[in-house]
Amino acid sequence: MGDAKGGGGRRALRRRWLMLGLFAATSAANAAHWLQFAIIAGVAQRFYGVGPAAINWTSMVFMAAYVPLVFPASWITDKKGLRVAVALGAGLTALGGWLKALGSWPERFAVAFAGQALVGAAQMFTLGAPARLAALWFPPGQVATACALGVFGNQVGIAVGFVVPPAVVSAEGAPEDVTRELLWLHVALAAAPTLLFLLILFLFEAAPPSAPAPEVEGGLGPEQLPLRPPAPLKEPLPAANGGAGGAARLSFGASLRALARNRDFALLWCAYGLNVGVFYAVSTLLSQMLLAHFPGAEEDAGRVGLAMVVAGVAGSVAGGLALDRWRRYKRTTLLVYALALAGLLAFAFALRSASLAAVYASAALLGFFTTGYLGVGYEYAAALTPGVAESTSSGMLNAASEVMGIALTLAAGELLEYAGDRLTNLALTAVLALGFLLSALVRDGDARARGAAGGGGGRGDAVEPVPQEPPEKFLS
């Protein structure tokens, strides 16, 4: 009872949806903090008596905290498993949230910022986990969709961070009113991960007792078999077509060396970082851009952000479904990138159109394709790097987005202050164009996967085959 058959007859447990739901909720609880201050930048500046740069750093601290901690976080996830990683993500988010509650008074910006930094550090345990959770718990035909749904949780949290703060914190309130409203907001944002932490301790499992079945029909390549059974650091992977061949999963250190030698992963790393970095910059500066053309539209800024995120959720799911159906990684990436570029251009001109409807529509278009790229990028990286744990390849992609997000947000913030939003958005469009060109240089993931399945296919960092264990070993 409670099980469903996987593609090759082994059972995919129905409680995989509970694991995915708990993870997505934890990711949402963390992401809700990211833009909490940036989306009410004017109110926060007046209340705490700080400048725009300080408020921008409440967003960028998420990126800055991630970069030095991604390596230990990836190691912990590989060594201790998803249960420990997700519990740490929820626990640190809760601690940071309660610290922010103590910073709900005008003279305590440093306390609120410290709490924000702690929440930013917590994201390292959730941001790169969707691909690994999907690979461990879901059969191959559902992996890309499950990964997209894992990203969905993060986007729901960002949506909450866009909409709730402007609705709760009054733009023209007295300091004592803002203190009360901020306190209520911070308590709510701390209570959610606290409850999730307890649920994870009692309900979340690191991995299923039996692995979802690989699909054996049609000679599927390794990008369709991302399963890495939770075992020692070196372990056999199921063969692409049910044969005796297999590939050893690399240790964490060997994985990093393999990624460093992989030309195509390096190109994807840069392209992914530029795409997501642009999304980070636009999201952080959205309120400032909008209020320059629509004074008093604080709540509209939140709703425009919501439009971006809701469309992005649809884009993430659509990208996952497309990959599950067609397995066209490069074509999907290039299409998504080109349309994201068009969306940013439309947004740049919509801001000057004096039409909020045009701003909403263009923001939704931008969000659909920039956010839709997240899950596609994770799955593309897994296809290009067989033998490397998904948490490691995803973690490296996220490191790229954080590094470039900081650089692009700082540069765009300065450009916005001194040159206005049109030039800022055109510069960000040029950055996306560069990312598109880098994506075009990545060799086709489908062809590389077929080569790996056939015995290397010229892959310079392919892992050596090891004797394949009988299926019963993974089911015991």
Image: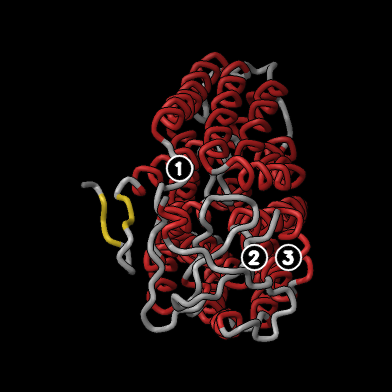
For the residues marked 1 and 3, what is the alpha-carbon distance in whole angstroms?
26 Å
Q: Residues within 10 Å of mark 1 (few under 14, many from 20)?
A: many
The residue that disc 2 covers is 272
Location of residue 468 in the rendering, given as x and y in whole percent from the top left corner: 54, 68
Mark toward the start of the polypeptide (1 vs 3): 1
Q: Nearer the viewer, residue 174 or 13?
A: 13
The residue that disc 1 covers is 23
Q: Mark 3 or 2, which is nearer the eye? A: 3
Q: Mark 1 or 3, which is nearer the eye? A: 3
> In this view of the protein, can residue 169 be seen by the observer?
no
Q: Quadrant of residue 338?
A: bottom right
Q: Secondary structure at mark 2?
A: helix
The residue that disc 3 covers is 259
Give the residue type at disc 2: Tyr
Direction from residue 420 to residue 181 in the image, left or right: left
Residue 157, disc: none
Please say which color scheme the image uses: secondary structure
Mark toward the start of the polypeptide (2 vs 1): 1
Mark toward the start of the polypeptide (3 vs 2): 3
Location of residue 281 in the rendering, given as x and y in whole percent from the top left corner: 65, 54
Task: Please determine whether, in this image, residue 149 is positioned above or below residue 8.
Answer: above
